[in-house]
Amino acid sequence: MLPHTSPGGEARGDPRTFADHGVPDARLLYRAVERGLDTPVGTTVRVGVLPLGVVAAAYREAFRSVDDRVPADVEAALSDAVACTAEQFGGRHARVREELLPAFYAHFVGFHAAYHGSVDPVVVS
């Protein structure tokens, strides 16, 4: 499932979210991360900091392929997406492509939208 549809098929997010960073369509970024992870459909992992760090690293690599650097707001959003996704799954097992990547992406896009133009943290209590 691409990041801009929910399980019910409703649109979610804007594919131009990262256009200012040279990524004209976020679906291309999402697909690059899927390819970079090379994880077959149905693969499960215990969600924690290590597998989420691998997902974040795949996003960093995708951004570097566009501009040789990871923008500060993207880096901050990735870091917070790791923490929020880890909390969301609480160490349970999840299917990588079907559950983990869409959840991570949703957090990542949310934080990026909050940080775009600023790297000040969003306080969540």
Image: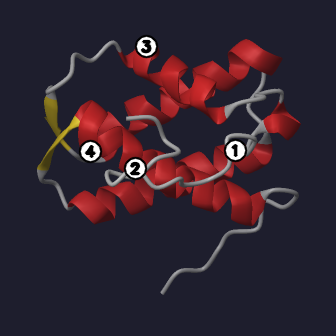
Viewed as shown, does residue 51 lie left or right of 36? left
Viewed as shown, does residue 98 lie left or right of 35? left
Question: Depth-wise, is mark 3 or mark 1 nearer the camera?
Answer: 3
Q: What element carries label 1?
A: helix
Q: Is mark 4 on a helix, strand or loop?
A: helix
Position of 39 relative to 21 (above/below) = above
Q: Nearer the viewer, residue 69 or 117?
A: 117
Which quadrant of the view contains residue 35?
A: top left
- Amino acid type of the residue tagged 3 in the rendering: Arg
Comes first in the chain, label 3 or label 1: 3
Identify residue for label 2: 9
Comes first in the chain, label 3 or label 2: 2
Whole-number angstrom distance, CA of label 3 to CA of label 2: 23 Å
Identify residue for label 4: 99
Comes first in the chain, label 3 or label 4: 3
Question: Depth-wise, is mark 4 or mark 1 nearer the camera?
Answer: 4
Position of 73 relative to 124 (above/below) = above
Whole-number angstrom distance, CA of label 3 to CA of label 1: 20 Å
Q: What element carries label 2?
A: loop
Comes first in the chain, label 4 or label 1: 1
Crowding near the residue tagged with mark 3, few <14, some 14–19, many ≥20 C-alpha atoms within 10 Å: few
Whole-number angstrom distance, CA of label 3 to CA of label 4: 16 Å
Identify residue for label 3: 35
Comes first in the chain, label 4 or label 2: 2
Comes first in the chain, label 1 or label 2: 2
Q: Which of 106 and 93 is in front in this view?
A: 106
Q: At which x and y percent is residue 68? A: 79, 17
Which quadrant of the view contains residue 93?
A: top left
Question: Depth-wise, is mark 4 or mark 2 nearer the camera?
Answer: 2
Q: At which x and y percent is residue 3? A: 49, 41
Residue at screen point 26% across, 44% down: 99
- Residue 74 got which mark? 1
